[in-house]
Image: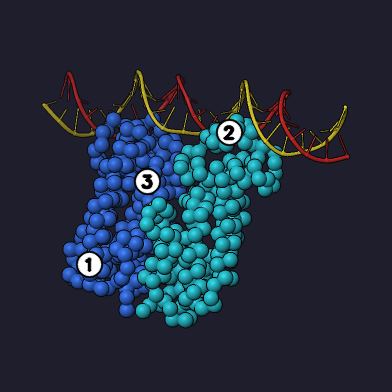
Chain colours: A blue, B cyan, C red, D yellow
Amino acid sequence: MNVMNASPRRKELTRLAAQLFVQEGFDRTTVRMLAQEMGIKSGSLFHHFKDKQEILAAVIEEGTQNALGIAKAALQSCPDSAEARLHAMARAHLETLFADRNAHVVALFEWRRLDPAASAHLSHLRDAYEAMWVEVIDDALAAGLIHGDRFLVSRFILGALNWTVRWYDPNGPRTPDDLADELVAMILSR
Amino acid sequence: MNVMNASPRRKELTRLAAQLFVQEGFDRTTVRMLAQEMGIKSGSLFHHFKDKQEILAAVIEEGTQNALGIAKAALQSCPDSAEARLHAMARAHLETLFADRNAHVVALFEWRRLDPAASAHLSHLRDAYEAMWVEVIDDALAAGLIHGDRFLVSRFILGALNWTVRWYDPNGPRTPDDLADELVAMILSR
DNA sequence: CATTTACACTAGCGCTTGCTTGGTTACTTA
DNA sequence: TAAGTAACCAAGCAAGCGCTAGTGTAAATG
């Protein structure tokens, strides 16, 4: 078995798995379905992954790592005002949400299928991402851009953003940036 | 088989099923687990429900009907201003979300497990509920209470509200009404 | 040239799944 | 007291599940 490496083959298989997990749900996706989508037989799958659980963990890790990278890049290359940073985070969130849509849908809706070990490991990644949000929101509160409880405000914002995967149509007239700007405009105290 | 009636026994079984579906997810909940939780044998389950699908549909129907009832009652017994109605809808949404939490979590996160027939039937119920929201939000926009695109605003609000099931702790210091008021305060243009 | 590595294959084991069958029990009604 | 009905059970079937064992082969490596 090809333990925990990041071969290009494995990356491609992870991408295909994410797509199937979104289409069918993790539980209803069988190893035979995964193998067929990948053009191999079900037994061959276990050369690349220890078990089905590890495929799920790989999908979620991939998505979360990308989200972290995009958010960091967005904050670094943006004006140093609280308002600009809030905009940048919202835009970055939706950018990664729809660039790696499959991985993020799996992360959001199949998280509970992770076994405890994988869940613990990936929780750290997600916490790192959420910490960036909390910092930006604290700055926005301190600057008087928004008002309210920091805990509630951040939950509401992330809820509204994450829920977009349930209704947003990438082929429609609006870009993810449009959504981000509209949401920020909606909550700014003016 | 006890076709599609609403016997008290069936109602109680539906309630227990909702709980298990939330704990384990629909796919991982076996008919044997359901039966055990209900204190009967797995074969007996099919006296009350045609198949496993019908249990899922029963859970979701129950929750959606309750939501409709609560929202209607809330709008009828509230001052006739756009702002009061917006408050009332947000409060009603969170009230039913946590009064029938299990049923609503299932409706929100297991909807795709419904077969097409059941999905079509229940979609009508859900559309009726969302139509109430659209009306209230249109009034709020017309009154100048909030600004933005009616479509986006309603999606953002419902997203923020629905996402509360992922983090809200009913045993914490805040009531659902607190949440509703904070959210409305956050989006009002002041 | 010999050996290792990466990747794929076939075949199937052991188990669980949703659901059916054929029948029994407990209660209500005529 | 007889008939009807709702509720239940023991047993098990056919299908499908994740995963393993063992083998073949072509390319990379010593």
The image shows residue B44 at horizontal and vertical percentages of: 64, 33
**B180 or A14, nearer to the observer:** B180
Chain identity of mark 3: A
Discs 1/3, front: 1
The image shows residue B138 at horizontal and vertical percentages of: 50, 76
Looking at the picture, does residue A3 appear above or below residue A189?
above
The residue at 58%/57% (across/down) is B66
Q: Are marks 1 and 3 in contact (CB under 8 Å)?
A: no
Disc ID at residue B39: 2
Discs 3/2, front: 2
Is residue B45 shown left or right of residue B86? right
**Amino acid type shown at disc 3:** Trp
Q: Secondary structure at mark 1?
A: helix
The residue at 28%/45% (across/down) is A122
Residue identifier under label 3: A111
Label 3 and label 2: CA atoms lie apart by 30 Å
